[in-house]
């Protein structure tokens, strides 16, 4: 009976170690997946079109679409958020105000009209705390259809004759 008891203990320890390794592996996978998502936003460019997956902190690069096809938003500008590397996250509300103000001029330059003259609405993207910690210091000026529909072409130079 002693040998069976030793085998049970050994099996239990082995299973416990295996479970711990799986748990650690899953944690590393999901944490690195979130970090990768945050890091991807560094590559956003003016003129990119994307599907809006909703919610704060959506990563545009996950949903790139050609501007010639149906899409929810288009990047009309980037607003620089000056802050030193390692600076604490200033908060979503403060960043959103700065981005909203900066996006007005970007809209006019890209679309060719004053906001909201051409049936478009802003859906700006604010860096998340994770993106901020990675050094992402740009706000994304995204626009979409004011009626909630999808865009089917670029909005660059979309200004109407009456604008």
Image: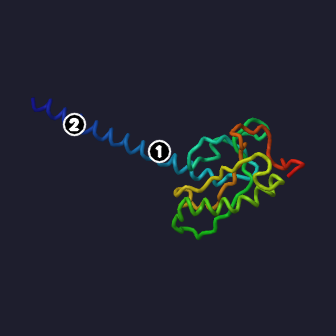
Q: Nearer the viewer, residue 34 or 53?
A: 53
The residue located at (62%, 43%) in the rendering is 62
Q: Regarding mark 1 in the picture, which secondary structure is present there?
A: helix
Answer left or right for 46 relative to 127. right
Q: Which residue is mark 1?
A: 30
As displayed, is residue 94 above or below residue 117?
A: below
Q: Residues within 10 Å of mark 2 (few under 14, many from 20)?
A: few
What crowding class fits label 1: few (fewer than 14 Cα within 10 Å), some (14-19), or many (20 or more)?
A: few
Left or right: 135 in relation to 144: left
x%, y% of residue 137?
62, 62
Q: Are marks 1 and 2 in contact (CB under 8 Å)?
A: no
Instruction: Measuring from the top left, give residue 75's x and y in whole percent.
Output: 72, 50
Q: Is residue 19 left or right of residue 25?
A: left
In the foreground, 20 or 87? 87
Q: Nearer the viewer, residue 68 or 31?
A: 68
Residue shown at the point (77%, 45%) measured from the top left = 119
Q: Which mark is residue 140?
A: none
Nearer mark to the viewer, of 1 and 2 = 1
Residue assigned mark 2: 10
The N terminus appears in which quarter of the rendering? top left
Q: Position of residue 127 (x, y in %)?
A: 59, 56
* Mark nearer the N terminus (1 vs 2): 2
Q: Residue furthest bottom?
A: 84
Q: Secondary structure at mark 2?
A: helix
Q: Residue 13 falls in which quadrant of the image?
A: top left
Calculate the distance from the C-alpha at mark 1 to the C-alpha at mark 2. 30 Å
Residue drawn at (56%, 56%) of the image = 131
Q: Identify the residue at horizontal 79%, vertical 51% (top origin).
A: 117
Residue 128 drawn above or below residue 65: below
- Residue 88 at x, y = what percent? 51, 67
User: Number of callouts in the render?
Assistant: 2
């Amino acid at each position: 009976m002693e040998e069976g008891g030793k085998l049970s203990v050994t099996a239990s320890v082995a299973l416990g170690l295996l479970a711990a390794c799986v748990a650690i592996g899953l944690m590393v996978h999901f944490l690195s997946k979130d970090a990768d998502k945050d890091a991807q936003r560094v590559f956003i460019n003016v003129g990119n079109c994307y599907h809006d997956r909703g919610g704060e902190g959506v990563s545009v690069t996950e949903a790139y679409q050609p501007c010639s096809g149906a899409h929810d938003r288009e990047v009309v500008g980037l607003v620089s958020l000056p802050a030193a590397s390692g600076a604490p996250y200033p908060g979503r509300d403060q960043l959103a105000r700065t981005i909203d103000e900066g996006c007005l001029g970007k809209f006019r330059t890209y679309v060719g009209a004053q906001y909201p003259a051409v049936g478009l609405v802003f859906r700006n993207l604010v860096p998340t705390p994770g993106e901020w910690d990675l050094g992402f210091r740009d706000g994304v000026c995204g626009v979409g259809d004011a009626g909630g529909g999808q865009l089917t072409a670029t909005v660059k130079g979309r200004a109407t004759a009456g604008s």
